[in-house]
Image (cartoon, rainbow, N blue to C red):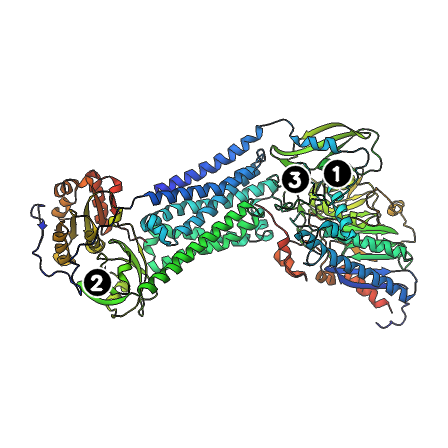
């Protein structure tokens, strides 16, 4: 049913009937609200990383006598060395950020990690290229030979330099895959594989740093520090990507319990396992799921859990958009599942205020539905859907609205209908939720909805730090 | 992407700043650095004997290229930390006094090796008259003492230029850059040896 | 080997053995008994092998390697090693640091050792009564007396580009000839001021009285690049012949060169060859115990080139390019 005014917008509440669409109803006992988690962890790690950068570049300062930079060649070489140290350090940081280490996830969160990774990436590519160019130019100037001659000299007479050049080439390719336009064109799997070549950059570039790096080639505290950093990142990688998932999956041994159609194009997968009461996933978080069935096992996709933890089962609610998601429909109960997670900061623990407004669209209702269970009472939910048939988990939402004293609005209509447009405007939001500026706002849905909502919220006076957006660009 | 641009700007600015400040610090102390204290006391009269006990690790006062090589030196050399045994024991400049049998009658100058210290790269020149040092000067480090743009003719009276020729006159032996056991077989020396083997009993 | 009919047997003995990673050619021209000659030759090669065992940087158990690692202390080392190291130190000073036993970061006196070993062997042969001999270890040559033909020894200087030709022919009866160049092992000589491979000279030949010193001087001159000839010109008692990268040549006016073509009679035809009798020269060298010689990365049997390809050619265990570090 379309609505033309917010007044008649459905404010649906239902009598408490049997609700839920799964093997069992949502728990009768409300889930405990998780305690707040501040940004201290994130800031602490940031400080640490900046300190590390300083520690990487300072040896150049200390190890270069004043007055030694007396010619153009020397200046260029000095700049090349600085950028080299910078690039080497930042590369390690990039790999560390993607190591999926639990403490990093806890302190920083997947969304921030990804954002940092992306933003640092551009600087890294430029730093590597600058390092190459400056060193070659500086050397050519000092040796008084041509630039191509210097390149040839480096490649033929210095060990590890062919590998270093190759590393730079791979780095540029990586940089290209980071461009949004390129990412959208490539299928996710291919993009992921290409991006794995980042490890190759590490391997190829490693040799020349320790053979020729002015601060690194001699045994001493600086060399030791760098070796320690490499070792640390390696350990973090192994731990985060291999050890922790192993421990998690052997402890919980998740498998498919049931697959339920929520709507013609949406399916919920219920998972059971062992010790689920010890599984610390917050509502709104996601896992990377790998279903060990034919055709599915070689892909891992991120899906949010769509119900807060209850110690009995986990559930994901997925909209079928492609071949992989279509395969989920055909999963047999008992299929083993390999899960990597939980991850994400789209949680009640990251709230900054006492009240919250949730805005969900389409299948974005999944994490929002889980969030609703864990937020303090008094939350509000605006659910945008095109038609009533697109409204998912309707009964659960209505039940939760009562149990958690939350207001739920279903705003039905296409994007251009005046009703939805008015609701999702600054005035409309303020009308629905008068104290919106003092609430945390959680958004999950199609990009158009999210962007429009963020604009409206900002105009309505909601500070940026109170707006939480669930990203799926992982 | 705004942050990425900021990062790039920061990198460029930071690098430039570091390089400029380090380069500017050169115009600091202009006075000769303490390195002079070494040679003055240590140059004995007459021919300089090699240090009596090469086992003593006496790292020369900064006259010896120390652990902080001049950065235009991207050296492969010396002193990985913990290798003090430079058997070139006595102070650098003293060593270069040519061990000529008799000191020249008139004053003659001796320059030491280029040394790096906190103030930059230094080369010391000593003027010796008879058997006494009459003057000590620090020289600007030659931009690169091992480079002249032309094969120099400064030593004209002693060296003469000539064309490179190819000769194959009968020889007893050939002097060349060390050949490996492999390239020996193809070398002229190898041919000479083989031919000679044929003549022997 | 059978005797070819019609050729007369040449007196003396020639022997070639592979020691120190290169070929060593010995030519004894004294008309001594074959058994004596054999003994003398055995002695020479045994000495060279002993030197290799003591000084080779490619052997873990050599004195040099052990000293470098620290498992051998200098007072416990052999007198030879101590003398060599002392000599290296002096040469370091004489060459303004361009000749450096520690250039590669590890002790590597091989640039001097080869020449010194040959010099000592030649001195011992002389003392043992073999006053006419020619000993060539991988290009470092020490000659004394006359060849079997009765002429002074004729020593060619390998052409820097054409391996089958020589650029000069020297003659002498008491000469040490050492050549350092980049055409065999690439630019393996490092300029200690910059840490980079030295450029500018393709081949440097030094003639003097002591082969170890001549070897060190030749290497140092290569390391100096284009100002090498200047410096060499100032070495009293030593003559040189230098070919630059661009094929320009400089040579000492008093280099004992034989005239073009043709055999020469007993004494050299041109007056300048008389100075082939370079005896004494400076007070450097000459000492029979020689001294240590360290290369700024000499073309000796020690430190090799950076090109991994070249390193792979040598029969040595271990890769030569590990010996050589550069910095960016």
- Element carrying mark 3: loop
Dot 2 falls on a residue whose secondary structure is strand
Residue A6, position as x, y percentages in the image: 9, 45
- Per the model, the C-alpha gap separating discs 2 and 3 is 73 Å
Q: Are marks 2 and 1 on the same chain?
A: no
> What residue is disc 3 on?
B65
Residue shown at 82% from the left, 38% from the top = B100
Return the residue at label 1. B95
Few, some or many residues within 10 Å of mark 2 (<14, 14–19, 20+): many
Query: Which is nearer the N-term, disc 1 or disc 3?
Result: 3
For the C terminus of chain B, the image quarter is: bottom right
Q: Are marks 2 and 3 in contact (CB under 8 Å)?
A: no
Q: Position of residue C245 (x, y in %)?
A: 69, 47
Label 3: few (<14), some (14–19) or many (≥20) C-alpha neighbours in 10 Å: many
The image quarter in which residue C126 lies: bottom right
Of B39 and B13, nearer the camera is B39
Which residue position holds label 2? A268
Report the side of B192 relative to A263 (left or right): right
């Amino acid at each position: 049913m379309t609505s033309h005014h917010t007044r008649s917008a459905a404010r649906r509440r239902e009598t408490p009937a049997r609700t839920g669409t799964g093997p069992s109803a949502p728990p009768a006992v409300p889930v405990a609200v998780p305690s707040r988690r501040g940004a201290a962890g994130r800031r602490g790690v940031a400080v640490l990383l900046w300190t590390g950068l300083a520690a990487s570049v300072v040896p150049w300062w200390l190890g270069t006598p004043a007055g030694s930079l007396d010619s153009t060649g020397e200046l260029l070489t000095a700049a090349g060395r600085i950028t080299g140290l910078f690039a080497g350090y930042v590369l390690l940081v990039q790999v560390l950020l993607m190591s999926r280490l639990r403490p990093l996830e806890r302190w920083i969160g997947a969304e921030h990690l990804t954002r940092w990774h992306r933003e640092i990436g551009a600087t890294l590519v430029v730093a590597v290229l600058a390092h190459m160019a400056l060193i070659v130019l500086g050397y050519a100037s000092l040796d008084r030979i041509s630039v191509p001659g210097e390149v040839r000299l480096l490649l033929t007479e210095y060990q590890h330099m062919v590998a270093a050049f190759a590393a730079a080439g791979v780095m540029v390719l990586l940089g290209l895959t980071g461009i949004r336009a390129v990412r959208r064109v490539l299928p996710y799997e291919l993009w992921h594989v290409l991006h794995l070549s980042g490890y190759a950059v590490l391997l190829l570039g490693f040799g020349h740093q320790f053979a020729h790096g002015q601060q690194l080639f001699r045994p001493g505290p600086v060399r030791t520090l760098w070796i320690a950093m490499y070792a640390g990142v390696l350990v973090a990688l192994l731990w985060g990507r291999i050890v922790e998932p192993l421990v998690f999956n052997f402890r919980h041994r998740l498998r498919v319990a049931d697959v339920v159609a929520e709507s013609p194009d949406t399916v919920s997968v219920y998972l059971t396992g062992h010790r689920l009461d010890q599984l610390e996933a917050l509502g709104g978080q996601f896992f990377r799921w790998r279903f060990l069935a034919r055709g599915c096992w070689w892909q891992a996709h991120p899906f949010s859990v769509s119900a807060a933890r209850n110690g009995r089962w986990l559930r994901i609610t997925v909209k079928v958009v492609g071949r992989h998601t279509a395969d989920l429909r055909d999963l047999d109960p008992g299929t083993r599942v390999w899960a990597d997670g939980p991850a994400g900061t789209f949680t009640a623990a990251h709230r900054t205020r006492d009240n919250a407004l949730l805005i969900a669209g389409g299948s974005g209702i999944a994490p929002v539905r889980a969030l609703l269970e864990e937020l303090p009472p008094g939350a509000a939910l605006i659910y945008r859907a095109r038609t009533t048939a697109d409204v998912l988990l309707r009964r659960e939402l209505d039940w939760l609205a009562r149990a958690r004293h939350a207001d739920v609005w279903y705003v039905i209509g296409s994007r251009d209908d005046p009703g939805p447009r008015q609701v999702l405007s600054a005035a409309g939001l303020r009308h629905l939720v008068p104290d919106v500026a003092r609430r945390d706002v959680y958004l999950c849905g199609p990009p158009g909805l999210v962007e429009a909502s963020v604009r409206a919220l900002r105009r309505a006076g909601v500070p940026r730090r109170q707006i939480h957006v669930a990203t799926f660009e992982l | 992407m705004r942050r990425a641009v900021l990062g790039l700007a920061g990198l460029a600015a930071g690098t430039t700043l570091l390089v400029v400040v380090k380069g500017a610090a050169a115009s600091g102390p202009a006075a000769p650095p303490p390195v002079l204290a070494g040679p003055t006391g240590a140059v004995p009269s007459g021919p300089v004997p090699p240090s009596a006990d090469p086992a003593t690790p006496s790292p020369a006062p900064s006259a010896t290229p120390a652990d902080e090589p001049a950065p235009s030196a991207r050296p492969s050399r010396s002193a990985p930390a913990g290798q003090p045994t430079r058997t070139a024991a006595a102070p650098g400049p003293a060593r270069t006094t040519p061990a000529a049998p008799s000191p020249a009658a008139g004053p003659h100058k001796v320059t030491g090796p280029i040394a790096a210290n906190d103030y930059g790269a230094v080369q010391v020149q000593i003027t010796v008259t008879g058997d006494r040092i009459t003057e000590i000067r620090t020289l600007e480090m030659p931009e690169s003492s091992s480079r002249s743009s032309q094969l120099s003719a400064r030593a004209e009276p002693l060296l003469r230029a000539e064309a490179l020729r190819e000769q194959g006159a009968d020889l007893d032996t050939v002097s060349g850059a060390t050949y490996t056991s492999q390239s020996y077989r193809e070398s002229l020396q190898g041919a000479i040896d083989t031919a000679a083997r044929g003549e022997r009993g | 080997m059978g005797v070819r009919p019609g050729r007369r047997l040449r007196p003396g003995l020639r022997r070639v053995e592979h020691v120190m990673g290169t070929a060593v050619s010995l030519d004894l021209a004294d008309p001594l008994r074959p058994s004596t000659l054999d003994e003398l030759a055995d002695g020479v090669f045994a000495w060279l092998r002993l030197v290799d065992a003591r000084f080779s940087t490619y052997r873990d158990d050599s004195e040099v390697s052990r000293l470098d690692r620290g498992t051998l202390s200098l007072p416990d080392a052999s007198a030879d090693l101590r003398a060599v190291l002392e000599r290296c130190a002096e040469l370091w000073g004489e060459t303004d640091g361009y000749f450096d036993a520690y250039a590669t970061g590890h002790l590597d006196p091989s640039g001097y050792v080869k020449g010194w070993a040959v010099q000592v062997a030649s001195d011992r042969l002389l003392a043992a009564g073999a006053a006419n001999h020619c000993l060539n270890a991988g290009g470092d040559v020490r000659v004394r007396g006359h060849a079997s033909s009765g002429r002074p020894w004729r020593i060619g200087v390998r052409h820097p580009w054409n391996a089958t030709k020589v650029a000069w022919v020297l003659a002498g009866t008491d000469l040490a000839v050492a050549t350092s160049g980049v055409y065999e092992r690439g630019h393996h000589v490092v300029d200690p001021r910059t840490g980079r491979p030295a450029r500018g000279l393709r081949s440097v030949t030094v003639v003097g009285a002591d082969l170890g010193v001549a070897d060190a001087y030749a290497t140092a001159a290569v390391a100096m690049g284009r100002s090498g000839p200047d410096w060499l010109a100032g070495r009293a008692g030593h003559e040189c012949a230098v070919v630059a990268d661009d094929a320009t040549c400089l040579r000492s006016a008093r280099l004992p060169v034989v005239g073009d073509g043709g055999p020469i009679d007993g004494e050299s035809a041109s007056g300048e060859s008389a100075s082939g009798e370079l005896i004494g020269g400076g007070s450097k060298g000459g000492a029979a115990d020689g001294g240590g010689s360290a290369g700024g990365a000499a073309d000796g049997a020690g430190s090799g080139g950076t090109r991994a390809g070249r390193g792979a050619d040598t029969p040595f265990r271990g890769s030569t390019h590990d010996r050589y570090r550069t910095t960016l």
